[in-house]
Image (cartoon, rainbow, N blue to C red):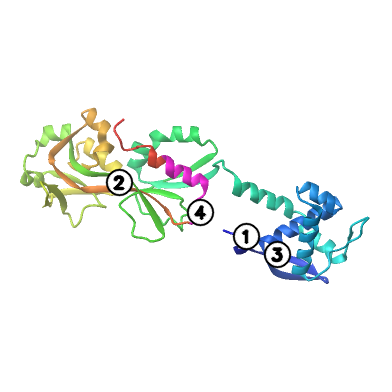
């Protein structure tokens, strides 16, 4: 945001009365220059400290006097004489040079630092994000993460969330989404379950099995699959619901029923033989996983480096 658009409320003393004035950023800088002049005791000394010229320092103090409508000092060739009003203004502004320098250091810093609040559901956190966090911390040691692990939708603005990984593309215009991964879900069952109940070979047999359904994608007990370009609907006769993909995975591994899951998320369980893909020709529509963050003109550097890192980390790819 340009200097002409950043306004700050400043309190100064005029004739013993507190006056609230709207002063632009440039005038705040002039106040800082004036405070430096008073502190070092001369225009020449202030010019040396601020790496400027004596004439430029004098000009900025004159501009400040015009803005405030008061004389701040009586100029002479030998010494600096501060007026009563000038002393009162200095008492208010004496910390301003340090404050402005700190603000300049923050805005010009090219080192990512600070806290980033990021939310995601449990299975994405454990299976995909956790493995890449050590390298991120090595790359950006001054960035700290506040991990908000939840399977529920959260209000990014109200909860002050900087970043989130979620399924789908948000319809909220206040949010920006970057696609991380696209993949259809497949049907899985535990080995113990299949030994006890048998492996289904048809849609009719699938409907007769026990199911663990994810609440977020099951509509009125109906499951929708794609097969050879066509849409197929199926309604299990018996099913339990769960709103956590990670819990659903564990329930299926435990032999409580059949479930649909993201193949990359259960890759390890499949390798170990804990899960078996059932009727692999049936898949859901492709699920989109997005990196979501509030729309801002200026994304903080600490958040931007995390966004870039996660987009390049290939979290969903085969290890």
x, y percent for residue 242? 26, 48
Q: Which span of residues is magenta-colored?
A: 297-309
Q: Mark 3 sits on what residue?
A: 10
Task: Determine the residue positioned at 92% across, 56% down.
Answer: 79
x, y percent for residue 205? 6, 44
- In the picture, the disc for residue 244 is 2
In the picture, the quarter occupied by the N terminus is bottom right
Q: CA distance from mark 4 to mark 1?
A: 15 Å
Q: Is residue 281 above or below residue 166?
A: above
The one of 62 and 139 positioned closer to us in this rendering? 62
Q: Main secondary structure of the magenta part?
A: helix
Q: Mark 1 sits on what residue?
A: 3
Mark 1 neighbour class, 10 Å CA radius: few under 14, some 14 to 19, many 20 or more: few
Asked whether disc 2 touches disc 3, contact meaning CB atoms under 8 Å apart, the reply is no
Q: Of the residues under marks 1 and 3, which one precedes in the sequence?
A: 1
Q: Is residue 279 magenta?
A: no
């Amino acid at each position: 945001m340009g200097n002409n658009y950043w306004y700050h409320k400043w309190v100064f003393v005029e004739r013993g009365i507190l006056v609230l004035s709207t002063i632009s950023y440039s005038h705040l800088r002039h106040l800082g220059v004036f405070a430096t002049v008073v502190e070092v005791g001369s225009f020449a000394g202030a010019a040396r400290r601020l790496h400027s010229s004596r004439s430029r320092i004098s000009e900025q103090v004159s501009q400040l006097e015009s803005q405030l409508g008061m004389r701040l000092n009586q100029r002479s060739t030998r010494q600096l004489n501060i007026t009563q009003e000038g002393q009162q203004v200095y008492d208010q502004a004496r910390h301003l040079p340090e404050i402005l320098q700190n603000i300049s250091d923050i805005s010009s810093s090219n080192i990512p630092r600070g806290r980033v609040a990021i939310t995601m559901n449990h299975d994405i956190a454990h299976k995909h994000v956790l493995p890449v966090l050590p390298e991120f911390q090595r790359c950006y040691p001054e960035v700290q993460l506040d991990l908000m692990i939840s399977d529920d939708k959260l209000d990014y603005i109200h909860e002050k969330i900087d970043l989130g990984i979620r399924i789908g593309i948000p319809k909220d215009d206040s949010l920006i989404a970057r696609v991380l991964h696209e993949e259809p879900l497949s049907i899985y069952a535990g080995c113990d379950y299949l030994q006890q109940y048998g492996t289904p070979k048809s849609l009719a047999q699938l409907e007769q099995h026990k199911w663990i359904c994810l609440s977020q994608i099951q509509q009125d007990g109906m499951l929708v699959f794609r097969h050879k370009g066509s849409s197929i609907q199926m309604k299990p006769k018996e099913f339990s619901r769960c709103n956590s993909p990670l819990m659903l995975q564990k329930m299926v591994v435990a032999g409580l029923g059949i479930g649909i899951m993201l193949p990359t998320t259960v890759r390890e369980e499949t390798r170990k033989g804990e899960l078996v893909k059932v009727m692999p020709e049936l898949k859901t529509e492709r699920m989109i996983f997005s990196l979501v963050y509030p729309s801002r003109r200026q994304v903080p550097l600490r958040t931007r480096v995390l966004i870039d890192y996660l987009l390049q980390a290939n979290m969903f790819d085969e290890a």
